């Protein structure tokens, strides 16, 4: 066999092995991630957060898509105050083998993180720190309602809130 035909045969075997791998969707991941479909869509609204200077308001949009056959949630968030971008983020939520979710976030500032998330009833909780949580739910009007809370001495204090209407 020539060098060329040996190389061709090897490439053919590698190609067959690569393409013969299963292309089935992970049914468990799809089942778990599909429970988060309630936040899918395009959203816009207002919110506030506590800063050192006091309570500051902002306008927010969230574009949430189910991706990879509903095994990943992709979230793009953009917040503005007085026309200036104050929040520019991308997040992905996946199911994990422990029965919860992994929330990965990326900020335009270069910061990124991987955090625990869980669905408690119909509310998505994610925890960017041991003493901090965000809770996303749909309120009685079908709006995205999200709060951010900090735990101090066993008590939760709200430092963030936003309410968004579904625009698509």
Image (spheres, rainbow, N blue to C red):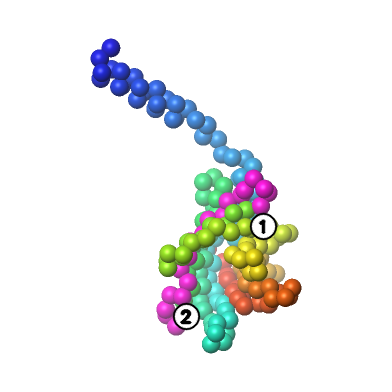
Q: Which residue in the structure is indicated by mark 1?
A: 118
| Magenta-span inclusion, residue 147 | no
On screen, 51 above or below 103? below
Q: Which residue in the structure is indicated by mark 2?
A: 81
Q: Alpha-carbon neighbours of circle 2 within 10 Å: few (<14), some, or many (≥20)?
A: some
Quadrant housing residue 155: bottom right
User: Are the residues at dot 2 and dot 1 in contact (C-beta closer than 8 Å)?
Assistant: no
Question: What secondary structure is the stretch in magenta mostly built from?
Answer: strand
Residue at the spot 28% in from the left edge and 17% down from the top edge: 5
Residue 75, horizontal then vertical, whole percent? 52, 60
Residue at the spot 56% in from the left edge and 39% down from the top edge: 25
Q: Nearer the viewer, mark 2 or mark 1?
A: 1
Q: Residue furthest bottom?
A: 53
Magenta residues (range): 81-100
Taking 5 as reference, is 68 left or right? right
Dot 2 falls on a residue whose secondary structure is strand
Is residue 145 among what the camera can see?
A: no
Residue at the spot 30% in from the left edge and 18% down from the top edge: 6
């Amino acid at each position: 066999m020539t060098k060329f035909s040996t190389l061709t045969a090897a490439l053919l075997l590698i190609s067959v092995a690569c393409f013969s791998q299963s292309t089935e969707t992970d049914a468990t991941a799809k089942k778990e991630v599909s429970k988060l479909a309630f936040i899918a869509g395009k959203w816009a609204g207002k919110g506030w957060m506590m800063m050192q200077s006091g309570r500051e308001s902002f306008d927010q949009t969230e574009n949430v898509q189910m991706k990879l056959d509903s095994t990943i949630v992709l979230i793009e968030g953009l917040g503005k105050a007085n026309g200036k971008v104050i929040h520019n983020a991308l997040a992905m939520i996946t199911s994990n083998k422990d029965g919860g979710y992994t929330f990965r976030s990326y900020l335009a500032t270069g910061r990124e993180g991987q955090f625990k998330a869980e669905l408690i009833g119909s509310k998505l909780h994610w925890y960017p720190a041991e003493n901090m949580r965000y809770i996303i739910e749909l309120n009685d009007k079908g709006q995205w309602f999200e709060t951010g809370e900090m735990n101090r001495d066993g008590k939760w204090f709200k430092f963030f809130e936003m309410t968004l209407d579904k625009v698509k």
